[in-house]
């Protein structure tokens, strides 16, 4: 019977192929990033994930060979769908075509569209072992700078804060792969304003990173030496690298820790440096780790013992103060993670200790009264997840052994092939401390927060998907912009109409409510006022033909605060993509107009960039934004990318603040990138 169903599916695939785009077509990454997170800061380094996606676009995941780990790395497949895919293969036999995933419950048009470019169904190679041809190399060199000189570069008084270097930005990345068994990654980067081969940076680049990853050595599943990242459980105790919060893929609030992985990002913080690996012992995965690295901070070396007043996490070393903070302290971290698997059940424990070479002092602000203080921090966490039929349950309990704890419990339930729900409850105590935790929540520090998140995805029709979530939260103690306990809520609804591989029409509404400090005349009873920010977005994207794609977006927001006038912000943009099937040149461009009454009305929107350099642009004040990206294929192994972008603020005599202030009404940048592959 199963062979008959597969034959019918295979025939159906060929009947419908004329109205479908090619499955190996490369996709734009914008929808992926914005589906995983509603908005990210302008300086977020997305290269860690964009590099992974680019790798799997070039080396698609074989559905008949994967154990699910590679699919987890894509970040947008929730654990319930992943389990269904594996079970489908176990029950029905190997996949005969990638479009077979459409027959699996829960794989709606949106998920299928996202997944298809990253997967394949291929036959096993008759060749065994490795040869020189199995090696692949990639060298990427990037240059960029702002064309206008900011105030920080014009100050000559050495007693004042200023930028010590030039506005040029440099980055070099080298990758070497032996199939998927051995990977070498080398990173070098200099940010704008940092010295280069002079002054306090005599060794050239400000950041150097190197890591070697080896997989499948007997019982050793993965061994990493150098820079690495750890992702365990729901991220309450140990999670390095990117983590995404609330977004259009509501089921992805359930984290899928992939354990040990190589660190390849240019982000200079939030990673480990040392050695780690995972050993398989029957049903157990044992992952010991050791890290020792320098960190930035404000150190008082005259105190006995030395104290750390603040730990800096910007990764920037442009000014005399930032240079003084650079590598001023050291942190040693070691620990052990043990994961036990039994069919659809997983349970793990993570223990770690971090030791500083100086005593960390808590801050003096009201919101910092429960911060960590000391030189040793110990954490332990217990986490688990279980999948049974249409239900996936997950949770983690973590404790910092100096007193505080954090708890996450949740579940994903498929009530119907077209209806899926998720619920997540969290309770992070005010005195829970972690150096590496990135738990799901409204705030980013995994402490002083209680909340309940519920989400629903309903496929109204084959091409129509409706996603919703509601998050209600409370901060028992003071936080940023709220000097006493406060409450809030986050409401989201998105309706998407999808043409298979042709286009998408999306309508999105979001309303964020919270309490903040009252800074006007008089006094409120609690010292807080209610505020809200409502956002509405309409986006249309369509592939006109095999070469041209267009995208339009209109977005507006309304910011309201008690005792203050309402403020508005809006953004309109048009994107054009030109990607011919043959030829050496590809282009994409944007023209945007935006206007915001206040900084609270700012809008973030994903911007296409040179390879691995994509990010979220910040649209604030009143002006125009335009950019042009070009890719030119010099030869089969050599590509060059270039970008020119400009912000234009009519009527402004100066833009920016502090050392980034510019005299004039334009802010522009250029980037040039060369990639050589072998």
Image: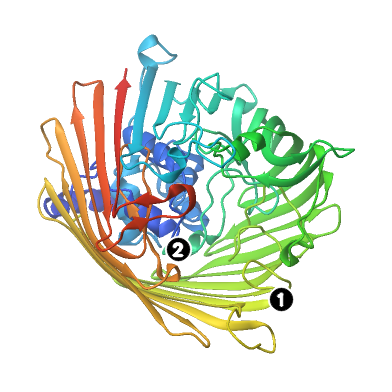
Measured as percent of width and height from the top left, residue 89 is found at 43, 46
Looking at this view, name the residue that lies furthest to the front: 157
Inspect this view and state whether residue 507 appears. Answer: no
Secondary structure type for disc 2: loop
Q: CA distance from mark 2 to mark 1?
A: 28 Å
Looking at this view, name the residue that lies furthest to the top: 132
Left or right relative to 537: residue 267: right
Measured as percent of width and height from the top left, residue 470 is found at 51, 76
Looking at this view, name the residue that lies furthest to the right: 304
Q: How many marks?
A: 2
Q: Nearer the viewer, residue 416 or 568?
A: 568
Left or right relative to 561: residue 111: left
Q: Nearer the viewer, residue 614 or 405?
A: 614
Q: Nearer the viewer, residue 20 or 473?
A: 473
Left or right relative to 313: residue 671: left
Provide the residue designation for mark 2: 247
The quadrant in which residue 138 appears is: top left
Provide the residue designation for mark 1: 484
Secondary structure type for disc 1: loop
Q: Indicate which label's residue lies in the foreground, 2 or 1.
A: 1
Q: Nearer the viewer, residue 404 or 596?
A: 596
Q: Residue at x 41, y 29 (%)?
A: 170
């Amino acid at each position: 019977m199963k062979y008959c169903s597969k034959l019918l599916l295979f025939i159906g695939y060929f009947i419908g192929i004329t109205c479908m785009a090619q499955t190996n077509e490369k996709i734009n990454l914008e929808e992926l990033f914005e589906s995983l997170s509603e908005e990210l800061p302008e300086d977020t380094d997305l290269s860690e994930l964009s590099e992974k996606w680019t790798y799997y676009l070039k080396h698609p995941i074989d559905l008949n060979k994967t154990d699910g780990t590679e699919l987890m790395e894509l970040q947008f497949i929730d654990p319930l769908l992943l389990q269904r895919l594996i079970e489908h293969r176990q029950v029905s036999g190997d996949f005969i075509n990638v479009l077979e995933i459409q027959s699996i419950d829960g794989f709606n048009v949106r998920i299928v569209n996202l997944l298809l470019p990253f997967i394949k169904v291929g036959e096993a190679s008759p060749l065994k072992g490795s040869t020189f041809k199995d090696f692949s190399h990639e060298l990427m060199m990037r240059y960029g700078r702002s064309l206008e000189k900011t105030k920080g570069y014009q100050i000559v008084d050495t007693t004042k804060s200023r930028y010590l270097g030039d506005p040029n930005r440099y980055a070099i990345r080298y990758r070497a792969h032996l199939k998927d068994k051995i990977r070498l990654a080398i990173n070098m980067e200099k940010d704008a304003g940092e010295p280069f081969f002079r002054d306090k940076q005599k060794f050239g680049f400000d950041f150097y990173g190197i890591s070697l990853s080896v997989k499948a050595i007997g019982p050793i599943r993965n061994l990493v030496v150098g820079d690495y990242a750890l992702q365990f459980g729901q991220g309450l105790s140990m999670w390095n690298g990117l983590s995404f919060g609330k977004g259009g893929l509501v089921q992805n609030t359930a984290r899928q820790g992939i354990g040990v992985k190589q660190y390849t990002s240019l982000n200079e913080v939030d990673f480990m440096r040392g050695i780690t690996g995972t050993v398989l012992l029957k049903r157990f995965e044992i992952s010991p780790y050791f890290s020792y690295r320098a960190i930035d901070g404000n150190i008082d070396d005259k105190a006995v013992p030395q104290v750390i007043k603040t730990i800096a996490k910007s990764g920037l070393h442009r000014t005399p103060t930032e240079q003084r903070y650079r590598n001023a302290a050291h942190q040693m971290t070691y620990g052990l993670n043990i994961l036990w698997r039994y069919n659809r059940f997983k349970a793990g424990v993570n223990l770690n200790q971090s030791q500083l070479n100086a005593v960390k002092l808590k801050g003096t602000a009201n919101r910092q009264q429960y911060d960590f203080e000391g030189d040793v921090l110990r954490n332990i966490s217990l986490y688990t997840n279980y999948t049974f039929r249409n239900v996936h349950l997950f949770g983690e309990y973590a404790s910092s052994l100096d007193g505080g704890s954090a708890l996450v419990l949740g579940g994903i339930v498929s009530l119907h092939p077209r209806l899926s729900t998720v619920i997540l409850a969290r309770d992070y105590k005010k005195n829970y401390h972690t150096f590496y935790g990135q738990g799901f929540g409204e705030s980013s520090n995994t402490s002083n927060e209680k909340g309940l998140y519920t989400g629903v995805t309903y496929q109204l029709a084959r091409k129509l998907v409706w996603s919703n979530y509601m998050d209600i939260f409370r901060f028992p103690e003071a936080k940023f912009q709220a000097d006493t306990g406060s409450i809030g809520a986050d409401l989201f609804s998105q309706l998407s109409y999808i043409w298979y591989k042709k286009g998408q029409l999306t309508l999105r509404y979001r309303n964020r409510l919270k309490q903040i400090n009252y800074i006007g005349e008089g006094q409120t009873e609690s010292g807080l006022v209610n505020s809200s920010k409502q956002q509405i977005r309409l986006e249309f994207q369509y592939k006109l033909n095999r070469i041209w794609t267009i995208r339009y977006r209109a977005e507006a927001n309304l910011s309201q605060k008690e005792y203050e006038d309402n403020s508005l912000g809006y953004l309109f943009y048009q994107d054009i993509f030109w990607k011919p099937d043959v030829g050496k040149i590809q282009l994409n461009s944007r023209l945007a107009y935006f206007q915001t009454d206040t900084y609270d009305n700012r809008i973030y929107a994903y911007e296409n960039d040179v390879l691995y350099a994509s990010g979220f642009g910040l649209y604030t004040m009143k002006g125009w934004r335009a950019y042009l990206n070009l890719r030119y294929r010099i030869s089969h192994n050599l590509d060059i990318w270039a970008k020119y972008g400009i912000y234009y603020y009519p009527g402004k005599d100066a833009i920016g603040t502090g050392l980034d202030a510019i005299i004039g009404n334009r802010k522009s940048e250029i980037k040039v990138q060369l990639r050589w592959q072998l």
